[in-house]
Image (cartoon, rainbow, N blue to C red):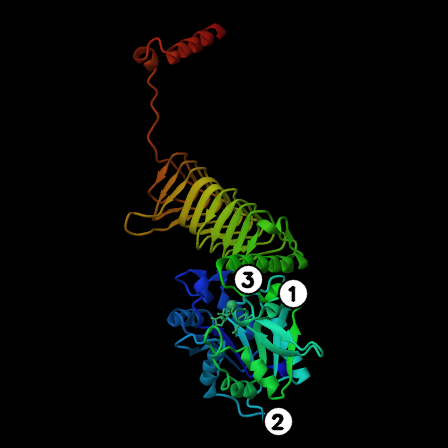
């Protein structure tokens, strides 16, 4: 591995991506929770290059900001005008020039340089590693990663010598003859170069083509004519080098990556009942025997532990699901769900929710910034915001933690082994002590000492005979009279 460690990787990301028809630069579009350029940088980092530079141009400030935020330490080179992929690589090498490593043996200046495009998000680190290994083993001046594709429209075609099969040139779609357009082997846009030979050849690239650009692909012909070894490495799976130029390809790449991520999970022992309806981000992790039901989206840094069951119809972002927990028809963001806890159906857990082991957030329950102790249940129709609840407490149906006074948020604390009545309002800040009870329909505005019963509601008053007097002859009055008659007959 370290023997093939490249001196540098150059990522091309200066283009606008006109065909995306977007105000967002192409390489910042996302699939599976990561930008297109982020996928490429992540794969490139697996090569452990001495240097990595991203060539930026269109919306460069936005792209640089994104790289600084998510891929700290990534260097960028600026390509003011998008004069072609060859020109872009030149800008990248110029940026690296200041710190370019000392020339290595055989007079080659600084070892292998890998070039990748910022719009090929499915490219894996393994494929890049295999490419650099082939490049080094064969002693090539350049090795291009190619693939046989069903439809080669738009791609550069790989032209081979009819007799020897050696690669002679890459011809861009727009410059290709009818015969060349029939070629199905295409340029992935990924190359391994001898750094010094690349720099020399780039100086000779011309712009006399249909697009008036400096094509990186012309370097192959230049090196070959100068008598250097030009090699090609054909990918086993052509889908890996899918280049994103429009939103149809963006969606296709997302689907393929999703399949790859779910296959990896299933191979590691996760049951995915219906992979076609499950969406997963690259950072999501699983333990074995987790079960994912249909219609589930697992996003961000979500983790699903052993024996946990998630879904159906659930969206979890940056949420940890503990061992054996059950999460059904739920939306959660930034929540921690304890071991064997139960969530939903139809729950909404917002950031800062921490459910202890065996705790429950049931049907139509919303929680936010709330710590719920082991075995505590909030089973029905409640809002729990800015609260701490102890262990083995039961919160009655239709309770609201009244946390907002119109200006500030306040905290409610409820102890362990409490039983609070249905339809309670806990007007924060307020504290209910351990083992306390509250009566149904109470508005709790004062602290409740441990072990007390708090009753905070109007007294009931029955006005007898009201219906007969005020609603004479009505169905209610007749039913009441009948009930009185039956009671009298029975006694
Ligand atoms: C390029 C290749 C083509 C290959 C295809 C694979 C060339 C001339 N063509 O074509 O052979 O089959 O990729 O997907 O190399 N970029 C810059 N600066 C520029 C121009 C492009 O940074 O001046 C970047 C773009 O942002 C993009 C990448 O280079 O990430 C490829 O550019 P794009 O315009 O998409 O090239 P293709 O026409 O797809
Ligand atoms: Ca492209």
Callout 2 crowding tier (Cα within 10 Å): few <14, some 14–19, many ≥20: few
Mark 2 secondary-structure assignment = helix
Residue 102's x, y, as percent? Answer: 53, 92
Please, which residue is most extreme toward the left here? 407
Q: Which residue is mark 3?
A: 282
Q: Is residue 98 left or right of residue 404?
A: right
Q: Quadrant of residue 467?
A: top left
Residue 211's x, y, as percent? Answer: 46, 73
Q: CA distance from mark 1 to mark 2?
A: 35 Å
- 484, above or below 338, in the image: above
Disc number at residue 422?
A: none
Q: Are marks 1 and 2 in contact (CB under 8 Å)?
A: no
Q: CA distance from mark 1 to mark 3?
A: 20 Å
Residue nearest the observer in this picture, 270 or 282: 282
Residue nearest the observer in this picture, 219 or 242: 219
Mark 2 and mark 3 lie on one chain; the one further toward the N terminus is: 2
Mark 1 secondary-structure assignment = loop
Residue nearest the observer in this picture, 235 or 401: 235
Q: Nearer the viewer, mark 1 or mark 3?
A: 1
- Could one spot residue 310 in this view of the protein? yes
Residue 75's x, y, as percent? Answer: 45, 78
């Amino acid at each position: 591995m370290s023997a093939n460690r490249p001196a540098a990787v150059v990522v091309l990301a200066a283009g606008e991506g006109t065909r995306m028809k977007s105000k967002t630069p192409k390489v910042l579009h996302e699939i599976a929770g990561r930008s297109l350029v982020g996928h490429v940088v992540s794969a490139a980092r697996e090569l452990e290059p001495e240097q990595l530079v991203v060539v930026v141009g269109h919306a460069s400030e936005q792209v640089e900001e994104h790289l600084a935020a998510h891929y700290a330490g990534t260097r960028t080179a600026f390509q003011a005008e998008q004069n072609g992929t060859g020109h872009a690589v030149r800008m990248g090498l110029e940026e690296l020039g200041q710190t370019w490593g000392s020339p290595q043996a055989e007079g080659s200046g600084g070892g292998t340089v890998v070039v990748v495009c910022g719009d090929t998000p499915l490219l894996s680190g393994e494929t890049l590693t295999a490419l650099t290994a082939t490049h080094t083993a064969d002693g090539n001046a350049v090795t291009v990663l190619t693939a046989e594709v069903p439809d080669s429209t738009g791609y550069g075609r790989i032209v081979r010598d009819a007799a020897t099969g050696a690669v002679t040139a890459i011809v861009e779609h727009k410059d290709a003859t009818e015969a060349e357009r029939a070629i199905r082997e295409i340029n992935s846009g990924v190359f391994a170069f001898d750094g010094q030979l690349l720099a020399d050849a780039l100086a000779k690239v011309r712009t006399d083509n249909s697009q008036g650009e400096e094509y990186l692909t012309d370097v192959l012909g230049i090196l070959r004519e100068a008598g250097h070894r030009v090699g090609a490495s054909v990918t086993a799976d052509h889908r890996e080098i899918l280049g994103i130029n429009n939103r149809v390809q963006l969606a296709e790449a997302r689907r393929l990556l999703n399949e790859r991520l779910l296959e990896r999970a299933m191979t590691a022992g996760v049951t995915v009942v219906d992979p076609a309806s499950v969406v997963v981000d690259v950072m999501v992790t699983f333990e074995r025997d987790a079960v994912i039901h249909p219609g589930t989206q697992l996003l961000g840094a979500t983790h699903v532990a052993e024996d946990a069951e998630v879904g159906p119809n659930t969206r979890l972002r940056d949420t940890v699901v503990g061992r054996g927990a059950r999460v059904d028809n739920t939306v959660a963001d930034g929540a921690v769900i304890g071991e064997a806890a139960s969530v939903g159906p139809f729950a909404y857990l917002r950031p800062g929710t921490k459910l202890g082991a065996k705790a429950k957030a049931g049907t139509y329950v919303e929680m936010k910034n709330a710590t719920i102790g082991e075995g505590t249940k909030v089973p029905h129709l409640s809002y729990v915001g800015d609260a701490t609840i102890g262990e083995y407490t039961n919160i009655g149906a239709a309770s609201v933690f009244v946390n907002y006074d119109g200006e500030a948020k306040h905290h409610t604390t409820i102890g362990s082994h409490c039983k609070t009545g249905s339809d309670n309002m806990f007007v924060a800040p307020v504290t209910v002590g351990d083992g306390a009870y509250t009566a149904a329909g109470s508005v709790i505005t004062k602290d409740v000492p441990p072990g007390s019963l708090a009753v905070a509601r109007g007294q009931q008053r029955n006005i007898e005979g009201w219906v007969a007097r005020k609603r004479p002859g009505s169905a209610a009055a007749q039913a009441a009279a009948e009930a009185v008659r039956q009671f009298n007959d029975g006694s």
